[in-house]
Image (tube, rainbow, N blue to C red):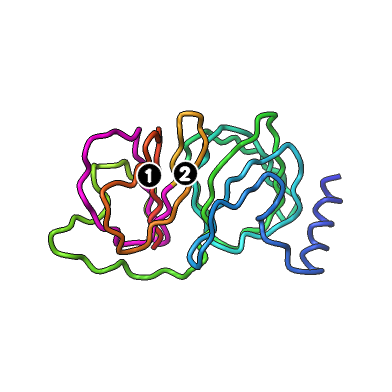
Amino acid sequence: MRGLLAALVVLLLQAQDPPPAYPRSGSTKMLENDRVIVWNIAWLKQQYPLHRHVYDLAGVYYTSGDRVIVSTEGVRRPVSTEAWNIAFQRSGVTHIEEGASDEPLRAVFIEIKAAPREQGSATAGEPVFPVDTPAQRLDNDRVRVWEYGAATEAPRPTHRHAHDAVVVSFDAAGSPEARYVERGTVHESDLPAGATRTFVFEIK
């Protein structure tokens, strides 16, 4: 059976370019602009078709769950992922995925559509994000990820965003919300009222 699957994958690859990973069953687009596409994803208990990730992506898993990743050679790799792990993947990955847990793994993924660019210029007298000492979760050539805890009513310092950013926050029920912050934005807080966790993805 695995040999048959491998042969089928090879034939599909030879026949045409695989479709992109999203949209698909269990995925909902949260926002899109010329820089990013943000998806709310559940790995439902099913096999998804062969697909290719056409963009670099980063994200955060917000429930734990299991899946099986099948390579283009037909090799099956079970994967268990814990909630609040950070994801990053380069473009070009081609594979098949299967949801494998009754309660599906869930994540918010950000596809980075645009090429890297320099950060915006600083302005005297305004601190540059990050402020309030969030935890840094990831830093590479495409994205820097910061995590904040629960929002409070305490005043926060006005700051400027030197990079475009996607802010992903979760309420007490664990439901995600995403918004885009354009490079150069000046404001007081990135944490929505009532948020229990907030992740800021600075897009480079």
Q: Is residue 114 left or right of residue 3?
A: left
State if disc 2 and disc 1 touch (CB < 8 Å). Answer: yes
Mark 1 to mark 2 CA distance (whole Å): 7 Å
Question: Of helix, strand and loop, which one carries label 1?
Answer: strand
Q: Write the residue at 47% across / 48% down.
A: 178
State left or right for residue 159 relative to residue 147. Answer: left
Q: Residue at 49% x, 52% y: name it.
A: 58
Residue 41 highlighted magenta (yes or no): no
Residue at image mark 1: 137
The magenta span reads 141-167
Q: Which residue is found at the position 56% from the left and 36% from the top?
A: 81
Mark 2, residue position: 86
Identify the image quadrant of the C terminus. bottom left
Quadrant where the image shows the N terminus: top right
Q: Where is residue 47 drawn, in percent x and y?
A: 76, 44
User: Label 1 amino acid?
Assistant: Arg
In this rendered view, identify the residue nearer to me: 160 or 50. Answer: 160
